[in-house]
Amino acid sequence: MRAPFQFPSTSGRLPVGGGQHGLRVGAVQYLNTKPLVHGLQTAGLDLAYDLPSRLADRLSRGDLDIALIPSIELFRGDGYGVVSDACIGCRGAVMSVKLFFRTAPARVVRLAVDEGSRTSATLARILLAERFGVFPSIEILPIEGRAEDTAADAVLLIGDRAIGSQRGGFQLIWDLGDEWCRWTGLPFVFAVWAARQGVPPESLRRVEPLLQAARDGGRANLAAIASAEASGHGLTVPQCLSYLRDNLHYHLGPDERLALSRFYGHAAKLDLAPTGLDVKATLAAR
């Protein structure tokens, strides 16, 4: 599910630095990923920017060696592994991933999910199933669609549309990051850097510090990122800075790995991910 990847800036292939590290890396230029890709343009990588779902598909086809993908795709791929402690996550309200209800959660029959929401859609279905025993039919809301374009009982929106106010007679709004964190006592991880099977370990070891350095540089420059990006997303600079600094978390630590394992367990139970995966091996640093 195309995580809370939001706010597209550019897409398409962009070779950088001659690909001196010999790996094809897929990245995302959305607002919430800006702190992760800060400085990657000068890292000497053969870099491609695309939508998160497309990066996941390209990684699956072998067109890429490493990509920033929705976390649910980590468990759907063939032999994928985490290659960096940089991630997109939250430890509470995430602000940009919300489920809007026209009825009580226990009465939801039809759920409309943002076309760009692979991880978030999985998370919404887990929360409804595990907490309320609800298994709604799924309707896809096009990228350019609005909440009022569907009569579904609940509507999942991510990105700019989630942050902005919504019409449509909603009686309840869930911030999915906050709901998961309160329910499990764990953080939530929306996106990770993953490598496909067969990439040489020595190559991964060369790239991992570059990804970490990009994240660290981005975190050190959140104010500059907010200043450059805010107006394009209808936010004030303080709002944008608060979102990047206070709502998002960029480090894949032990609690985040535990949260991913828990997320996988719920997804597999609901047939939203394949069963029998060696999660410990998948989440182990390569």
Image (spheres, rainbow, N blue to C red):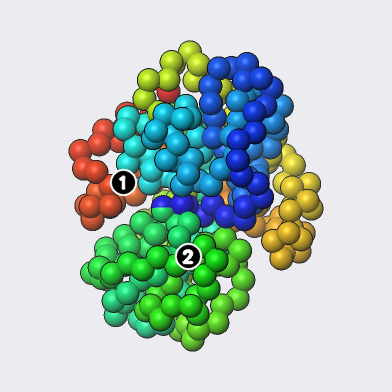
Whether residue 216 is visible, yes or no, is no
Q: In the image, residue 159 lies at what x, y percent?
A: 57, 60
Q: In the image, residue 257 lies at what x, y percent?
A: 40, 39
For disc 2, the neighbor class at 10 Å (few under 14, some 14 to 19, many from 20) is few
- Outermost residue to the bottom: 169
Q: Is residue 212 left or right of residue 259?
A: right
Mark 2 element type: loop
Q: From what the image shows, is residue 249 above or below residue 130?
A: above
Q: Amino acid at mark 1?
A: Tyr
Q: Amino acid at mark 2?
A: Pro
Does label 2 or label 1 sit earlier along the sequence? 2
Whether residue 261 is visible, yes or no, is yes
Residue plotted at (62% across, 71% down): 164
Residue on which disc 2 sits: 142
Find residue 28 and report its image quarter: top right
Q: From what the image shows, is residue 150 above or below residue 14?
A: below
Residue plotted at (37% across, 83% down): 103
Residue plotted at (40% across, 75% down): 154
Instruction: Name the residue nearer the viewer: 140 or 100.
Output: 140
Q: Is residue 214 left or right of residue 56?
A: right
Residue plotted at (39% across, 33% down): 61
Q: CA distance from mark 2 to mark 1?
A: 26 Å
Q: In the image, residue 265 lies at what x, y percent?
A: 27, 47
Q: For the C terminus, which image quadrant?
A: top left
Q: Is residue 83 left or right of residue 126?
A: right
Q: In the image, residue 272 lies at what x, y percent?
A: 28, 52
Mark 1 element type: helix
Residue on which disc 1 sits: 264
